[in-house]
Amino acid sequence: MQNAFVLNAQSIALIRELGDHMPGGFFIYRAEAPEELLYANKPVFDIYGCSDLEDFKQLTGYTFKGMVHPEDYRRISDSIVEQIERSDDNMDYAEYRIIRKDGAVRWVDDYGHYMDTDEYGGVYTVFISDITERRARITSTIDRQKATIEDLNQSFRRLHAEQITFSRVAQALAKDFFSIYVVDPDTESFVEYSSTDAYDRLGIEKSGENFFDVSRRNMARILFPEDRDVFLAIFKKDRVMAILERDGAFTTKYRLMMDGEPVYVSMKATLLVDQYGRHLIIGTNNINAQMQREQEFQKNVTEARNRAKNDFLANMSHDIRTPMNAIVGYTNIANSHLDDPAVVKDSLEKISSSSHFLLSLINDVLDMSKIESGKMQLSMGECDLEAILKRIEDITSLQATKKSLSISYRRDGLRHTRVRGDELRIEQILINIISNAIKYTPDGGRVDMLAEEEPTGDAHKNLYRFVIADTGIGISEDYLPHIFDSFTREQSTTINRIQGTGLGLAITAKVVEQMGGKITVESAPGKGSRFTVELTLESSEAFGSGGGANAEEDVDLAGRSILLVEDNDINAEIASMILGQFGMDVERAENGLVAVEKAKAGRFDAVLMDIQMPVMNGYEATRAIRALEEKRYRSIPIIAISANAYDEDVRDCLAAGMDAHIAKPFDPQELIRLMKREIHNAADRAREG
């Protein structure tokens, strides 16, 4: 019997409509030159950035050669011919570049099949999809794509053999799915086309009325029990149609019980509207293999994270116990040598050094916790880079001197030093990197810090570049890609002798990222490292005269009356002794309620307020003091002195009416500086009325 391809308006419309609703690009072209295209669906137009067939023809000449990047065509053409000659089933696969209408170069994959036809001679039928973003991660198997192509080739042969009908095209396309349902959304009559024996064995009706009621009844029977309630809640006609009207597609995922095992299935529904009416096309597909790969991947990721955290905890246990051992050991030594001032002094210095290191460990962990939980926020304000860099120089030059390192600071390339930014975080970034450079550079080495500025094209913003280079031990090529990862440290004999959590650079990188900047590193073992930080900062000229700082220094704290609100006896004793050393008179309140009563009865120059206390906490006590009738209670300095040290804790303190915040354990000099500032500011407020 001679095959005949019957072509009429209805068959053309159905091919076009069904082809345009396929999940990817599909086209057919003659094998002989000039490789003229016989058909291309709308997803192909979309891949090439074309709006319609005429647009596509103008771009490609409607030939296969016109579809391929000129530099790739000869290679791809030869490869296809060679693959077809070697293939028993006339299949080929290729990946090549295309040039879209907008000039963008994209990668596509091409699953093709060669066949001989009476009407057109040799032709290729091709599946095509854009793989630019996922090219390296394609996990679909070639065998499945071959089967899909073969199914569509069979459909194409039927188009040559007899009059095309809607049901036969749908049935051919169904072979790429578990099943395809064609539903009349108005009458809910339906026809189902399945392509697998396993799906047929589920005992689902092939056709009938009341599609949604029938489907819900069937699904209640065959759904995996844990997915049943969720699916039945969303798979209702009014809800599905509303989503289709809003989004153009309805998708969901669930598990079916097949041969006693749960199997993941995806469902996608689209609404086809044409001159023949409305049709709801619902396709279901077996995605069990894909889900298993994803679950395995997530399992591996989780295990890797757990290993990293376990390693981190092991390192932390060692790093915490090391300074703690020193603190306990030298405390015992001091206690047993009370009659030897030199031994006591040496022990106290080492206890102080170890306690500062222990505090830095805790601060690193807290900073990383804030960053990973999304709770770290920038405190943007006016700051002076010149002053920041001077403070950094004062701090780090002492560290370098102790190791006999040469260190230089160059900032003559800065022209606009007054900027808007988070002063604390800028300082933290640079101190972390410089301290690391000093830590990992052997005695007698060198560390250099360069600060420079470049215009950005925005008159109000400049790019600030900070380069820290050292002659230290360097970083191995294997570890370099992980240098900014959390909970990691390079393992080497040299590095393992150096204390640290492995969080410093991770925190630095996260802070730089949050500030919209960039951090890079160049390094080689034995040749040192070079870190570069780039921050775009807004210039600011709105700075005061600077006279306030000198006025604050002139504040005399001797004889000042201080209300210390602290529930912990040891903390209260430490604070009282420190304040007493500066000549202040300290009165203690054990909780917030007592503090309010004492504030009413006495006149205090400042209040140091703990936060977490019994009876009444620091926030409540502050609000109560500020609400007292006398005007002086609105200006009295109230400074939070608390272990609650997160950014949101500081904001909560200020919102409650406090003037400043200092975290425990506090630096006595920092507390004194803060008290002088706030007492000075309170005096200014009182004078202004």
Image: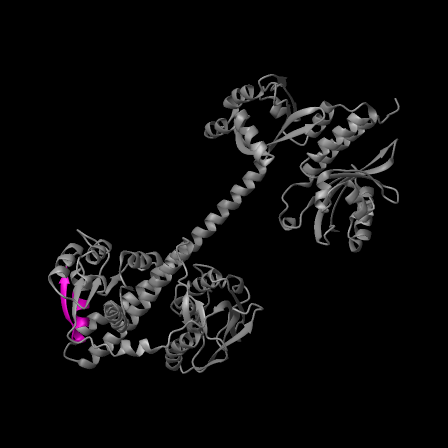
In this rendering, the answer to whether 636 lies above or below 11 is below
The quadrant in which the N terminus is found is: top right
Q: Quadrant of residue 497?
A: bottom left
Image position, residue 351 (x, y; %):
26, 72
Question: What range is drawn magenta here?
Answer: 573-589
Q: Which residue is nearer to you in this view: 492 or 299? A: 299
**Residue 367 magenta:** no
Quarter of the image where one finds residue 194:
top right
Above-or-below relation of 180 to 536? above
Would you say 574 lies left or right of 81 here? left
Q: Position of residue 524 (x, y in %)?
A: 54, 71
Quadrant of the rendered image containing residue 502: bottom left
Q: Is residue 685 visible?
A: yes
Q: What count of labels does the image hold?
A: 0
474 horizontally vs 164: left or right: left
Q: Position of residue 683 (x, y in %)?
A: 23, 71
Residue projecting furthest to the top: 208
Q: Residue at x 49, y 64 (%)?
A: 483
- Quarter holding the C terminus is bottom left
Q: Position of residue 547 (x, y in %)?
A: 33, 78
Residue 579 lies left or right of residue 284; in this view the side is: left
What residue is at 55 percent from the left and 73 percent from the top?
Answer: 454
Report the front residue among 261 and 418: 418
- Asked if residue 531 can be seen in this view, the reply is no
Q: Nearer the viewer, residue 332 or 64?
A: 64
Which residue sits furthest left? 601
